[in-house]
Amino acid sequence: MTVLEQINALPEGTWLRCQGCAVLLHHEALARHEHTCPNCGRHFPVRALDRVAMLADPGSFTERHANLAPLDPLGFTDRLAYPDRLARAQARTGLNDAVVTGLATLGGRPVALAVMEFAFFGGSMGSVVGEKVARIAGDALRGRVPLVVVSASGGARMQEGVLSLLQMAKTAEAVRSLRQAGVPFVSVLADPVYGGVAASFASLGDVIVAEEGARAGFAGPRVIEQTIRQELPPGFQTAEFLLEHGHVDRVERRQELRGLLDRVLGILSGERDAAAPAEPPAEPPAGDLDAWETVRLARDPGRPNARRRVEELFTGFVELHGDRQGGDDPAILGGLARLDGLPVVVVAHHKGADTAENVARNFGMPHPAGYRKAMRLFRLAERHRLPVVTLVDTPGAYPGVAAEEGNQSGAIAECLLLAAGLRTPVLSVITGEGGSGGALALAVGDRLLIQEHAVFSVISPEGAASILYGTAARAPETARALKLRGADLRALGVVDAVVPERNLGPTLARHLRDLLGVPIDDLVAARRGRLRSYGVWSTEGEDHD
């Protein structure tokens, strides 16, 4: 008997061929690599119970709602009666329906867990799937423990008709209750996620992670091609497509998923590092440079950009992408992190470290999608009572045609409105250029700091000089007139402190701890009062009646 004949004589599933690299893999070797090809990294499908074992701490999973079983409300028959199809799926998978739910620990932290089984009716959502997802969300709500859902589904289950469709609304309402209570929900998209699951709970996570190799969308490629005859671009609805278009926060390899969930849930749950904070050093006085020289220093290409500052100032940073509406603007960097042990949400203008990256990041000038990304992160912080730290460094909002088509003014205005009433501490620092409304959108908060070699202005000195004098050559004197340095802004009551260049981290930590000690109602009231106080005017002749 040849080797091939011997292989063919083995039980089905003993050997599998990788569709990525064509290597033949033994199922035990595949399992040791969490069902990914050790040769090319391609992700194989994973059964629900295997997925539970990958995510939950060993021995910690207790199944919930396992006895819920599907019925046949329509008496549905196609080539086979629906009850017969159900019986076959149940015999093949050992499950009552297409989702496994239960309570477990992940990294020692209690979690509620739901994992969909694609091998059961293509992971389709009928009454039982919708009810089990809603029930496990209710368990998470009552226990105030994070919910993690791993989806793999072709959509709603046709055999249950409109009752299946209505599970979309049921599960969305269950997520609404979690959001209202501030209970974290992380949605993981495995391959594939389409239709009613994609358009309900799977797209409503506080954080959405697409597993590498996942495909997701509302209408599948075949539906699109058959209904409207539209030719689809390469990579359509892949995980990378979803990331590029702002639908998901991250694309993650399966081997990295558990560690990522541990970090994300720790921050969203407000867990603080146990280490006691070090006392910040005393702040030396800021220097007194000329205004134009300060402008030049603020724009210095060698000045740390957002990525470098996040690496220097924060620990455990988990970048989150996208505005969930169609874009992921690289001119805004945001995510979860810790500042001196305190869990925070970071939002920053992001310039490039070199010319090529600056071009890719639009020189730190956000489009409307960037401000929508910032607002999404602001709301995430508010839901989970995490303070926000913003790093401001931009020449201004992008002024091009695409930005105007996307309603740049509206995006900035909504960002200002949201920040003004955000019910969580907001600490802002201008680290370089603070250019006009594009900078202000990330500079509304409870404390506004500025580094000594940074500036904040209504317009660039060159722009002002061109308008006032007809030439940008008079920018240096215009810079002095605009009072854009930290010392000038401190005198005007605009900023709370001028921070020496080498003292930013301890200063941020000190101010953040001060803000965390203030009751939230008092904090928001003081912020609104602060905003109302900006400006100078005469009251002579004012009617006080």
Image: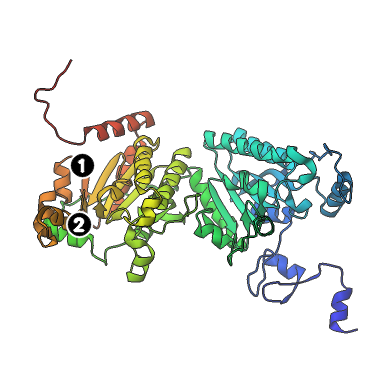
What residue is drawn where x is 58% and y is 42%? 146
Residue 488 appears in the rendering: yes
Residue 328 image offset from top left, x and y in percent: 46, 56
Residue 390 image offset from top left, x and y in percent: 34, 49
Q: Quadrant of residue 184?
A: top right
Structural crowding at the residue carrying mark 2, measured as other residues with C-alpha within 10 Å and reported as few (<14), some (14–19) or many (≥20): many
Structural crowding at the residue carrying mark 1, measured as other residues with C-alpha within 10 Å and reported as few (<14), some (14–19) or many (≥20): many
Q: In the displayed orientation, state which residue is furthest to the top.
A: 545
Kindly report which numbered mark, 1 or 2, lies closer to the viewer in this rendering.
1
The residue wearing badge 2 is 453
Q: In the displayed orientation, state which residue is furthest to the right.
A: 1
Residue 276 image offset from top left, x and y in percent: 39, 47
Label 1 SS: loop
Label 2 SS: loop
What residue is drawn where x is 9% and y is 25%? 540
The residue wearing badge 1 is 494
Is residue 333 rendered to the left or right of residue 281? Answer: right
Please state, as top left, top right, bottom left or bottom right, where the N terminus lies in the image. Answer: bottom right
- The Cα atoms of the two marked residues, 1 and 2, are separated by 16 Å
Is residue 537 rendered to the left or right of residue 277? Answer: left
**Foreground: 314 or 42?**
42
**Foreground: 98 or 545?**
545
Q: Is residue 543 above or below residue 272?
A: above
